[in-house]
Image (spheres, rainbow, N blue to C red):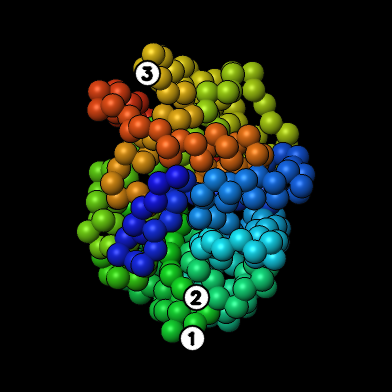
Amino acid sequence: MKYRKFGQHDLTPSEIGFGAWAIGGSWGAQKDDESLAALHHALDLGCTFIDTAAGYGNGHSERLIGQVLRERQAAGKVESVFVATKTPPTAGEWPPSPYCQVAERYPESYLRENIAERMACLGTDKLDLLQLHTWTRAWNRDPVPFKILRELQAEGKVGLIGVSTPEHDQNAVIDLMRGGWIDSVQVIYNIFEQEPAAELLDVAAECGVGVIVRVAFDEGALTGKFTPETTFAPDDFRSGYFAGDRMERTVKRVDAIKAEVTGSGFTLPQVALKFVLAHPAVSVVIPGMRSIAQAEANCHVSDLTALPSDLLSKLRAHHWRRAFWYAGK
């Protein structure tokens, strides 16, 4: 496993992190014993970064993570594992609209209460990294929630402070980075979604902001395992993400990428992760891991050689100007 700098901060996480959404729910049937085994195995392989959120099973993902860390401590394992979690806005539009009031979606009393809940679920008295789970450009002129989080940081309840980008307007957080409001940014960046390479990633590097990349597999599409006939259970997040004709359109584009990868010595999932890691501003990529096999495959990618420059150039041509798919067609 290789390790990288996290912006300007005194932290060098594993470049492959553990994405913990699926172990909390919303991705189809998942057994806790399989989730626990997957997380233990990833940590055994040198993974030191875990990303979770309040919304991943209403704290269930966090509670499993806390359980694993306690078990490892009780077993005498000496390791430094960094856990990033997220607080969502109060109930309302997701992502917040330009007309949402920040005082209603991220009020101080709510932030303090929710962060206390995050600590309780994880079993800690200080969060390594607290991220706001979404944002809107409308709040950039007076980012009150981050002022509150800086107070919580000074109180010793929060280590680093970050934000997870709104899917349709990821560049909305650039002003936050330049204003010094955040220590990290979590962004969607993959072979299809390459817009962050235009400015966001470079600004993060210039400002010393750690970069966490999510959705590296485009919710599974870039693993190459889907067909036009693939469907998901109604309670699986992907049933909405790939609604209508989206799966058929996506598979056609994935097949074109497979043709580029053939003969390279890499599998498509390996290429998907290596593409993300090829950008020097990226600190860690957080693919979801639901099983020991997935933990093994994802963590192993760190030990592979970098993608050749000619293959990287070919992959850049597969940028899909799709923005982001919300529910419906």
| Amino acid bearing label 1 | Glu
Using the rendered image of the protein, determine whether residue 56 is visible from the camera's viewpoint: yes
Q: CA distance from mark 3 to mark 1?
A: 51 Å
> Label 2: few (<14), some or many (≥20) within 10 Å?
many
Mark 3 vs 1, N-terminal side: 1
Percent coordinates x, y for residue 112 in the rendering: 57, 79
Residue name at image x 35 percent, y 32 percent: 305
> Would you say the residues marked 3 and 1 are in contact, meaning their CB atoms lie under 8 Å apart?
no
Percent coordinates x, y for residue 246 in the rendering: 54, 27
What residue sits right under mark 1 in the picture?
155
What residue sits right under mark 3 in the picture?
264
Relative to 288, say whether 262 is above or below: above
Q: Which residue is at the front of the view, 14 or 133? A: 14
Mark 2 secondary-structure assignment? strand
Relative to 215, say whether 281 is above or below: below
Percent coordinates x, y for residue 154 in the rendering: 44, 84
> Label 1: few (<14), some or many (≥20) within 10 Å?
few
What residue sits right under mark 2 in the picture?
158
Percent coordinates x, y for residue 126 in the rendering: 55, 76
Q: Which residue is at the front of the view, 175 or 313? A: 313
